[in-house]
Protein backbone atom coordinates (compact mmCIF):
# COMPACT_ATOMS: atom_id res chain seq x y z
CA UNK A 1 0.00 0.00 0.00
CA UNK A 2 1.46 3.32 -1.09
CA UNK A 3 1.00 6.82 0.34
CA UNK A 4 -0.03 8.98 -2.60
CA UNK A 5 -0.76 12.17 -0.62
CA UNK A 6 0.30 13.26 2.86
CA UNK A 7 -0.32 16.71 4.33
CA UNK A 8 -1.17 17.95 7.80
CA UNK A 9 -4.90 17.68 6.98
CA UNK A 10 -5.13 14.85 4.46
CA UNK A 11 -3.77 11.33 4.09
CA UNK A 12 -4.48 9.21 1.03
CA UNK A 13 -3.24 5.67 0.44
CA UNK A 14 -3.69 3.31 -2.49
CA UNK A 15 -3.16 -0.41 -3.01
CA UNK A 16 -2.90 -1.82 -6.52
CA UNK A 17 -2.87 -5.65 -6.28
CA UNK A 18 -0.31 -6.37 -8.97
CA UNK A 19 0.47 -9.78 -7.48
CA UNK A 20 -3.19 -10.85 -7.48
CA UNK A 21 -3.65 -9.67 -11.06
CA UNK A 22 -0.56 -11.57 -12.17
CA UNK A 23 -1.55 -14.74 -10.29
CA UNK A 24 -5.11 -14.67 -11.67
CA UNK A 25 -3.83 -13.85 -15.14
CA UNK A 26 -1.53 -16.86 -15.13
CA UNK A 27 -4.50 -19.11 -14.31
CA UNK A 28 -6.61 -17.51 -17.04
CA UNK A 29 -3.88 -17.87 -19.68
CA UNK A 30 -3.04 -21.41 -18.58
CA UNK A 31 -6.66 -22.34 -19.19
CA UNK A 32 -6.66 -20.86 -22.69
CA UNK A 33 -3.35 -22.25 -23.97
CA UNK A 34 -4.41 -25.92 -24.39
CA UNK A 35 -7.47 -24.83 -26.35
CA UNK A 36 -5.32 -22.70 -28.65
CA UNK A 37 -2.88 -25.47 -29.52
CA UNK A 38 -5.13 -28.53 -29.59
CA UNK A 39 -7.89 -29.32 -32.02
CA UNK A 40 -9.22 -32.14 -34.14
CA UNK A 41 -7.11 -35.09 -35.30
CA UNK A 42 -8.33 -37.50 -37.97
CA UNK A 43 -7.03 -40.44 -39.97
CA UNK A 44 -8.75 -41.42 -43.21
CA UNK A 45 -7.76 -44.23 -45.55
CA UNK A 46 -9.42 -45.12 -48.86
CA UNK A 47 -8.76 -48.48 -50.58
CA UNK A 48 -9.40 -48.88 -54.30
CA UNK A 49 -10.58 -52.19 -55.85
CA UNK A 50 -7.05 -53.01 -57.03
CA UNK A 51 -5.76 -52.71 -53.43
CA UNK A 52 -4.02 -49.37 -53.86
CA UNK A 53 -5.12 -46.19 -52.09
CA UNK A 54 -4.03 -43.33 -49.86
CA UNK A 55 -4.13 -42.38 -46.20
CA UNK A 56 -4.20 -38.90 -44.75
CA UNK A 57 -3.59 -37.62 -41.22
CA UNK A 58 -5.14 -34.21 -40.62
CA UNK A 59 -4.42 -32.16 -37.49
CA UNK A 60 -6.30 -28.88 -37.19
CA UNK A 61 -6.16 -26.17 -34.52
CA UNK A 62 -7.41 -22.62 -34.33
CA UNK A 63 -4.15 -21.51 -35.95
CA UNK A 64 -3.45 -24.00 -38.71
CA UNK A 65 -4.25 -27.29 -40.42
CA UNK A 66 -1.52 -29.84 -41.14
CA UNK A 67 -1.84 -32.79 -43.51
CA UNK A 68 0.32 -35.85 -44.04
CA UNK A 69 -0.47 -38.27 -46.89
CA UNK A 70 1.13 -41.56 -47.77
CA UNK A 71 0.25 -44.59 -49.92
CA UNK A 72 -2.01 -47.14 -48.28
CA UNK A 73 0.39 -49.97 -49.11
CA UNK A 74 3.03 -48.26 -46.90
CA UNK A 75 0.81 -48.64 -43.81
CA UNK A 76 2.08 -51.82 -42.16
CA UNK A 77 0.15 -51.49 -38.92
CA UNK A 78 0.16 -49.66 -35.63
CA UNK A 79 1.37 -50.03 -32.08
CA UNK A 80 0.72 -48.29 -28.76
CA UNK A 81 3.89 -46.68 -27.44
CA UNK A 82 4.29 -45.97 -23.71
CA UNK A 83 6.06 -42.85 -22.48
CA UNK A 84 7.05 -43.09 -18.78
CA UNK A 85 7.78 -39.82 -17.01
CA UNK A 86 10.26 -38.98 -14.26
CA UNK A 87 7.34 -38.61 -11.82
CA UNK A 88 6.37 -42.25 -12.30
CA UNK A 89 3.38 -41.63 -14.58
CA UNK A 90 2.98 -43.24 -18.01
CA UNK A 91 1.23 -41.85 -21.07
CA UNK A 92 0.50 -43.55 -24.38
CA UNK A 93 0.45 -42.75 -28.10
CA UNK A 94 -0.78 -44.57 -31.20
CA UNK A 95 2.02 -44.78 -33.77
CA UNK A 96 1.53 -45.69 -37.44
CA UNK A 97 4.24 -48.03 -38.78
CA UNK A 98 5.60 -47.25 -42.25
CA UNK A 99 8.58 -48.89 -44.03
CA UNK A 100 11.19 -46.31 -43.09
CA UNK A 101 9.56 -44.31 -40.31
CA UNK A 102 6.73 -44.16 -37.80
CA UNK A 103 4.16 -41.40 -37.54
CA UNK A 104 2.30 -40.57 -34.30
CA UNK A 105 -1.43 -40.37 -34.85
CA UNK A 106 -1.50 -37.21 -32.76
CA UNK A 107 1.10 -34.97 -31.11
CA UNK A 108 -0.24 -35.34 -27.57
CA UNK A 109 -0.17 -38.46 -25.46
CA UNK A 110 -2.55 -39.34 -22.63
CA UNK A 111 -2.91 -41.87 -19.80
CA UNK A 112 -5.93 -43.67 -21.34
CA UNK A 113 -4.24 -46.83 -22.66
CA UNK A 114 -7.56 -48.58 -23.35
CA UNK A 115 -8.71 -45.83 -25.71
CA UNK A 116 -5.42 -45.87 -27.60
CA UNK A 117 -5.46 -49.65 -27.88
CA UNK A 118 -8.98 -49.56 -29.35
CA UNK A 119 -7.82 -47.11 -32.03
CA UNK A 120 -4.77 -49.22 -32.82
CA UNK A 121 -6.91 -52.37 -33.13
CA UNK A 122 -9.27 -50.64 -35.61
CA UNK A 123 -6.38 -49.56 -37.80
CA UNK A 124 -4.72 -52.99 -37.69
CA UNK A 125 -8.00 -54.66 -38.58
CA UNK A 126 -8.36 -52.37 -41.63
CA UNK A 127 -4.79 -53.14 -42.75
CA UNK A 128 -5.36 -56.89 -42.46
CA UNK A 129 -8.82 -56.96 -44.07
CA UNK A 130 -8.61 -56.10 -47.81
CA UNK A 131 -12.41 -56.14 -48.08
CA UNK A 132 -12.72 -52.88 -46.09
CA UNK A 133 -12.80 -49.97 -48.52
CA UNK A 134 -12.28 -47.11 -46.08
CA UNK A 135 -11.26 -46.21 -42.54
CA UNK A 136 -12.10 -43.02 -40.64
CA UNK A 137 -10.90 -42.21 -37.13
CA UNK A 138 -11.52 -38.76 -35.69
CA UNK A 139 -10.81 -37.28 -32.27
CA UNK A 140 -11.80 -33.79 -31.16
CA UNK A 141 -9.25 -32.81 -28.52
CA UNK A 142 -10.55 -29.25 -28.47
CA UNK A 143 -13.87 -30.47 -27.11
CA UNK A 144 -12.09 -32.48 -24.41
CA UNK A 145 -10.20 -29.38 -23.29
CA UNK A 146 -13.22 -27.07 -23.06
CA UNK A 147 -14.20 -27.94 -19.47
CA UNK A 148 -10.62 -27.85 -18.03
CA UNK A 149 -10.03 -24.59 -19.89
CA UNK A 150 -13.18 -23.04 -18.48
CA UNK A 151 -12.26 -24.19 -14.96
CA UNK A 152 -8.72 -22.78 -15.12
CA UNK A 153 -9.64 -19.54 -16.88
CA UNK A 154 -12.73 -19.09 -14.71
CA UNK A 155 -10.67 -19.59 -11.55
CA UNK A 156 -8.24 -16.92 -12.70
CA UNK A 157 -11.03 -14.47 -13.45
CA UNK A 158 -12.71 -15.16 -10.09
CA UNK A 159 -9.43 -14.48 -8.29
CA UNK A 160 -9.12 -11.15 -10.07
CA UNK A 161 -12.79 -10.24 -9.52
CA UNK A 162 -12.96 -11.02 -5.80
CA UNK A 163 -9.41 -10.29 -4.65
CA UNK A 164 -7.95 -7.99 -7.31
CA UNK A 165 -9.58 -4.82 -6.04
CA UNK A 166 -7.88 -1.44 -6.06
CA UNK A 167 -8.07 -0.02 -2.53
CA UNK A 168 -8.14 3.73 -1.89
CA UNK A 169 -8.20 5.13 1.65
CA UNK A 170 -8.75 8.81 2.42
CA UNK A 171 -8.48 10.57 5.77
CA UNK A 172 -9.54 14.24 5.64
CA UNK A 173 -9.41 16.37 8.78
CA UNK A 174 -10.98 19.43 7.14
CA UNK A 175 -14.16 17.60 6.15
CA UNK A 176 -13.92 15.22 9.15
CA UNK A 177 -14.31 12.33 6.72
CA UNK A 178 -12.89 8.85 6.33
CA UNK A 179 -13.52 7.12 2.99
CA UNK A 180 -12.61 3.57 1.96
CA UNK A 181 -13.13 2.68 -1.72
CA UNK A 182 -12.70 -0.81 -3.20
CA UNK A 183 -12.82 -0.91 -7.00
CA UNK A 184 -12.93 -4.14 -8.94
CA UNK A 185 -14.39 -5.79 -12.03
CA UNK A 186 -17.64 -6.42 -10.15
CA UNK A 187 -18.09 -2.76 -9.26
CA UNK A 188 -17.13 -0.42 -6.46
CA UNK A 189 -17.84 -0.40 -2.75
CA UNK A 190 -17.59 2.78 -0.67
CA UNK A 191 -17.42 2.96 3.13
CA UNK A 192 -17.64 6.30 4.91
CA UNK A 193 -17.33 7.29 8.55
CA UNK A 194 -16.79 10.57 10.38
CA UNK A 195 -13.06 10.80 10.94
CA UNK A 196 -13.55 11.26 14.68
CA UNK A 197 -15.07 7.75 14.80
CA UNK A 198 -11.80 6.13 13.66
CA UNK A 199 -10.00 5.04 16.82
CA UNK A 200 -6.90 3.29 15.46
CA UNK A 201 -5.48 0.92 12.88
CA UNK A 202 -3.57 -2.28 13.49
CA UNK A 203 -2.27 -5.46 11.88
CA UNK A 204 -4.24 -8.62 12.59
CA UNK A 205 -2.44 -11.94 12.36
CA UNK A 206 -4.24 -14.58 10.31
CA UNK A 207 -3.42 -18.19 9.61
CA UNK A 208 -0.16 -19.41 8.05
CA UNK A 209 1.73 -16.15 8.65
CA UNK A 210 -0.70 -13.93 6.80
CA UNK A 211 -1.76 -10.49 7.98
CA UNK A 212 -4.61 -8.04 7.53
CA UNK A 213 -4.85 -4.29 8.12
CA UNK A 214 -7.92 -3.43 10.18
CA UNK A 215 -9.48 -0.23 11.49
CA UNK A 216 -11.26 0.09 14.82
CA UNK A 217 -14.07 2.54 15.46
CA UNK A 218 -14.63 4.27 18.77
CA UNK A 219 -17.67 2.00 19.19
CA UNK A 220 -15.42 -1.07 19.17
CA UNK A 221 -16.57 -2.18 15.74
CA UNK A 222 -13.76 -3.28 13.42
CA UNK A 223 -13.51 -3.81 9.69
CA UNK A 224 -10.72 -4.83 7.29
CA UNK A 225 -9.10 -2.37 4.94
CA UNK A 226 -8.42 -5.11 2.38
CA UNK A 227 -10.83 -8.00 1.67
CA UNK A 228 -8.13 -10.66 2.17
CA UNK A 229 -5.07 -11.38 4.31
CA UNK A 230 -1.63 -11.87 2.79
CA UNK A 231 2.02 -12.22 3.73
CA UNK A 232 4.27 -9.26 4.45
CA UNK A 233 3.95 -8.04 8.03
CA UNK A 234 6.50 -5.21 7.86
CA UNK A 235 4.77 -3.38 5.01
CA UNK A 236 1.35 -3.61 6.67
CA UNK A 237 2.77 -2.47 10.02
CA UNK A 238 4.36 0.54 8.30
CA UNK A 239 0.97 1.50 6.85
CA UNK A 240 -0.77 1.23 10.22
CA UNK A 241 1.90 3.42 11.79
CA UNK A 242 1.39 6.00 9.04
CA UNK A 243 -2.32 6.06 9.82
CA UNK A 244 -1.67 6.20 13.57
CA UNK A 245 0.69 9.13 13.13
CA UNK A 246 -1.85 11.05 11.04
CA UNK A 247 -4.65 10.39 13.52
CA UNK A 248 -2.41 11.42 16.40
CA UNK A 249 -3.02 8.30 18.49
CA UNK A 250 -0.60 6.07 20.39
CA UNK A 251 1.40 3.47 18.45
CA UNK A 252 -0.28 0.15 17.82
CA UNK A 253 0.41 -2.60 20.34
CA UNK A 254 2.24 -5.59 18.94
CA UNK A 255 1.34 -8.14 21.60
CA UNK A 256 0.02 -11.40 20.17
CA UNK A 257 -3.07 -12.30 22.25
CA UNK A 258 -2.25 -15.97 21.85
CA UNK A 259 0.80 -15.41 24.08
CA UNK A 260 -1.62 -14.44 26.90
CA UNK A 261 -3.59 -17.68 26.73
CA UNK A 262 -3.17 -20.37 29.43
CA UNK A 263 0.00 -22.45 29.02
CA UNK A 264 -0.26 -25.85 27.25
CA UNK A 265 0.22 -27.73 30.53
CA UNK A 266 -2.56 -25.73 32.19
CA UNK A 267 -4.84 -26.32 29.19
CA UNK A 268 -4.12 -30.06 29.33
CA UNK A 269 -5.09 -30.08 33.01
CA UNK A 270 -8.34 -28.32 32.20
CA UNK A 271 -9.08 -30.80 29.40
CA UNK A 272 -8.54 -33.79 31.68
CA UNK A 273 -9.94 -32.27 34.87
CA UNK A 274 -13.59 -32.37 33.90
CA UNK A 275 -16.32 -29.75 33.99
CA UNK A 276 -16.00 -29.15 37.73
CA UNK A 277 -12.39 -28.03 37.46
CA UNK A 278 -13.16 -25.95 34.36
CA UNK A 279 -16.06 -24.21 36.13
CA UNK A 280 -13.83 -23.52 39.11
CA UNK A 281 -11.26 -21.90 36.82
CA UNK A 282 -13.96 -19.73 35.19
CA UNK A 283 -14.99 -18.49 38.62
CA UNK A 284 -11.36 -17.64 39.43
CA UNK A 285 -11.05 -15.65 36.19
CA UNK A 286 -14.33 -13.86 36.89
CA UNK A 287 -13.09 -12.89 40.35
CA UNK A 288 -9.93 -11.43 38.79
CA UNK A 289 -11.99 -9.45 36.29
CA UNK A 290 -14.26 -8.08 39.04
CA UNK A 291 -11.14 -6.73 40.77
CA UNK A 292 -9.41 -5.60 37.57
CA UNK A 293 -11.64 -5.36 34.44
CA UNK A 294 -8.56 -4.72 32.27
CA UNK A 295 -7.08 -8.15 33.05
CA UNK A 296 -6.80 -9.33 29.44
CA UNK A 297 -5.27 -12.65 30.43
CA UNK A 298 -8.35 -13.43 32.57
CA UNK A 299 -10.69 -12.55 29.69
CA UNK A 300 -8.79 -14.83 27.34
CA UNK A 301 -8.71 -17.52 30.01
CA UNK A 302 -12.51 -17.47 30.29
CA UNK A 303 -12.81 -17.71 26.50
CA UNK A 304 -10.40 -20.67 26.43
CA UNK A 305 -12.32 -22.57 29.13
CA UNK A 306 -15.67 -21.91 27.46
CA UNK A 307 -14.23 -23.16 24.16
CA UNK A 308 -13.03 -26.35 25.88
CA UNK A 309 -16.60 -26.84 27.13
CA UNK A 310 -17.88 -26.57 23.57
CA UNK A 311 -19.33 -23.10 24.18
CA UNK A 312 -17.59 -21.25 21.37
CA UNK A 313 -20.49 -18.85 20.90
CA UNK A 314 -20.46 -17.85 24.60
CA UNK A 315 -16.65 -17.44 24.47
CA UNK A 316 -16.89 -15.13 21.47
CA UNK A 317 -19.75 -13.14 23.02
CA UNK A 318 -17.69 -12.59 26.19
CA UNK A 319 -14.76 -11.17 24.21
CA UNK A 320 -17.02 -9.03 22.00
CA UNK A 321 -18.78 -7.57 25.05
CA UNK A 322 -15.57 -6.36 26.68
CA UNK A 323 -14.05 -5.29 23.38
CA UNK A 324 -16.96 -2.87 22.91
CA UNK A 325 -16.72 -1.77 26.55
CA UNK A 326 -13.01 -1.00 26.33
CA UNK A 327 -13.52 0.88 23.05
CA UNK A 328 -16.30 2.98 24.59
CA UNK A 329 -13.90 3.86 27.42
CA UNK A 330 -11.18 4.85 24.95
CA UNK A 331 -8.99 1.85 25.85
CA UNK A 332 -8.35 0.94 22.25
CA UNK A 333 -5.20 -1.10 22.82
CA UNK A 334 -7.17 -3.48 25.05
CA UNK A 335 -10.06 -3.57 22.60
CA UNK A 336 -7.57 -4.38 19.84
CA UNK A 337 -6.14 -7.33 21.77
CA UNK A 338 -9.61 -8.79 22.29
CA UNK A 339 -10.47 -8.25 18.62
CA UNK A 340 -7.34 -10.13 17.59
CA UNK A 341 -8.29 -12.93 19.98
CA UNK A 342 -11.73 -13.11 18.34
CA UNK A 343 -10.07 -13.33 14.93
CA UNK A 344 -7.81 -16.15 16.22
CA UNK A 345 -10.93 -18.08 17.27
CA UNK A 346 -12.38 -17.71 13.77
CA UNK A 347 -9.21 -18.81 11.94
Image: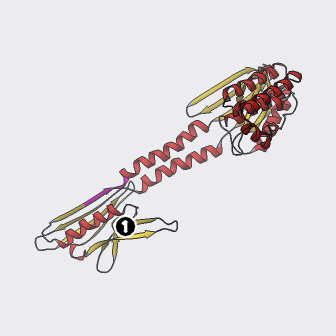
Q: Residues within 10 Å of mark 1 (few under 14, many from 20)?
A: many
Q: Residue at x 50, y 66 (%)?
A: 88
Visible residue check, residue 272: yes
Name the quadrant of the N terminus.
Answer: top right
68 to 205, vertically: above or below = below
Magenta residues, as a range? 137-142
Residue 7 seen in the figure = no
Does the magenta portion include 139?
Answer: yes
Residue 328: quadrant of the picture:
top right
Asked if residue 173 lies in the magenta stretch, the reply is no
Q: Is residue 318 left or right of residue 106?
A: right
Q: Nearer the viewer, residue 118 or 165?
A: 118
Q: Is residue 230 above or below residue 120?
A: above
Say which quadrant the C terminus sits in: top right
Quarter of image, res 179: top right
Give the labeled residue for mark 1.
Answer: 93
- Residue 24: percent from the left, percent from the top? 57, 45
Residue plotted at (57% across, 29% down): 187
Amino acid sequence: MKVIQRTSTELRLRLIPWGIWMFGGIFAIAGLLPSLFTGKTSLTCDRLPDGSGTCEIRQSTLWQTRRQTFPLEDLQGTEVVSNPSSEGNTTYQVVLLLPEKSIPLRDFSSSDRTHHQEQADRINQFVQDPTQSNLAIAEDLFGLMVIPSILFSGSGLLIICFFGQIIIIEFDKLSNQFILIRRGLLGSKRIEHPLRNIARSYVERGSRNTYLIKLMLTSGETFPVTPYSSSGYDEKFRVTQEIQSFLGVEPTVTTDPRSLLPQPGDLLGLMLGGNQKRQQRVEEYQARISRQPEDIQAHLGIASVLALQGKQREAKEHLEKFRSQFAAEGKYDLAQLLDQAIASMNS
